[in-house]
Amino acid sequence: MKSVSKIEAGSGMIVFVDPFNHGLSHVPVNAGIIETAFAAEPDCKLVIAAEKGHLDGLSELVSKDIWQKAQIIPIVPPPPGTRFMARLKADYRNLEQVFRRSEGKGKLVLADIAPATLYALRLNSLRYPRAFRQFAAVLHGNGSELAGWRARNPLIRATQLRSAMAAAPAMTRFVVLEDSIRQALLDVAPEFEKQMVSLPHPLPTAEGSSHFAESTAPAPDDAEASRPVRIGFLGAAETKKGFDSFVDLARSLTRRFPGKIEFHAIGWLPPERYDLDLSCLARQPSRKKISRAEFRAALEAVDYVCMPYSPELYRYSASGTLLDAVAAGKPLIALRSPIFDDLETRFGDIGELGENLKELESRMEKLVNNQDARRYLRQAGVMQEIRKSRMPAGLVPCWRSLFFDKN
């Protein structure tokens, strides 16, 4: 890993900046984006700027061949919840570090943004007009702000995402991580049709290739066929992510089918939820954040990933949980939503999709009563096909389509 005082010139240059995240937040997707960029432009000069803990996480996931070639710039993003003007100053200062060092007219990729970040981008592009010829800014959950409340007060409205996107440099593309999300956002903000593009949520090589290659579903005559069906819930045990519904399903089904179905919560329990009765779970969520290695080992031990989310939760935002399931080749048990319907249409049977929780419970009941191993193997195979499509090499055409200038 090389630190840098001056970015080398050259049109084949990609500068990747995360001015927002601290520590391991969004490390997997950022690693996937970096590897995808390098797969598309293997001769490019690559610069990575992020918070030190984030850089440490990236160094563990990004291919060593890529990481060792990259030039590294540590920055200090403002803490979460920073108000607009303070973030504007911090983002301007962090982006200036790459603008003033670059004369290569390459591409600048912002891995995550707040509205203030886009104003900081505009100010730096005016001050250093020769630094970059292309900009890309990734929208995560904040894309939902486009569908939210718009202030009447012009000063407040100027600090909101829609206004900030309109103020961004003309050569900026706004990247969302699923095509269904792009369509949903354009329904509420059609003025960005020419600037908003989609990149399927990428998987870094380390995440996409380290899981098992074949499903662990038992064959019909296998002695393992008598073991319980194992259902996993991934991530923070929060109400908004459907954890309460997951527990309700677990309580009902384990009571009705003792020893035939298990529910595993693989993730973290917030302190305000310590009083929950989770005795129906075979694995309870940890009271501290677990390591990535422990998370992946626990994920490989389940058969399905349960996502009982409201369809609105990921209408405007990509799901890291979905990509964890894809990486592990695990079929889904989920409420229907545009993102799942899109995957089902393009790839085939991805698991058990229901219109409501009652239907999900009915589908799980059928899994207990009739374990169709052949269908499970087909579902797992579909998830593996999705995984291949999200690997960096498979996303090269999508990456190249992100920019106005394809060269």
Image (cartoon, rainbow, N blue to C red):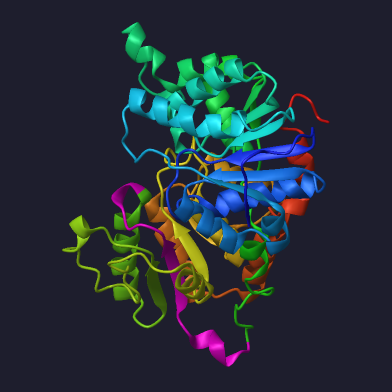
Task: Indicate the quadrant containing the N terminus: top left, top right, bottom left or bottom right.
Answer: bottom right
The residue located at (34%, 40%) in the rendering is 80
Could you say which quadrant of the image residue 375 lies in?
bottom right
Give 324 or 382, whichever is nearer the viewer.
Answer: 324
Which residue appears farthest toward the front when viewing the image?
5
Q: Please state the horizontal and vertical placement of residue 124, each as a whole percent of the image.
A: 56, 22
For residue 204, above or below residue 146: below
Left or right placement of residue 78 versus residue 251 in this view? right
The residue located at (67%, 57%) in the rendering is 67
Which residue appears farthest toward the left when viewing the image?
275
For residue 181, above or below residue 22: above
Give 116 or 13, whichever is nearer the viewer.
Answer: 13
Left or right placement of residue 279 versus residue 22 in this view? left
Q: How many marks?
A: 0
Residue 177 belongs to magenta span: no
Q: Please state the horizontal and vertical placement of residue 376, each as a whole percent of the image.
A: 62, 69
Q: Is residue 351 visible?
A: no
Could you say which quadrant of the image residue 110 lies in?
top right
Look at the image and give the residue range highlighted in magenta.
221-240
Q: Is residue 232 visible?
A: yes
Q: Please state the horizontal and vertical placement of residue 250, each as a whole percent of the image.
A: 33, 67
Task: Indicate the quadrant containing the C terminus: top left, top right, bottom left or bottom right.
Answer: top right
Give 10 or 134, whichever is nearer the viewer.
Answer: 10
Residue 228 belongs to magenta span: yes
The residue located at (53%, 15%) in the rendering is 166
Q: Please state the horizontal and vertical placement of residue 200, each as a whole percent of the image.
A: 65, 44
The residue located at (61%, 78%) in the rendering is 216
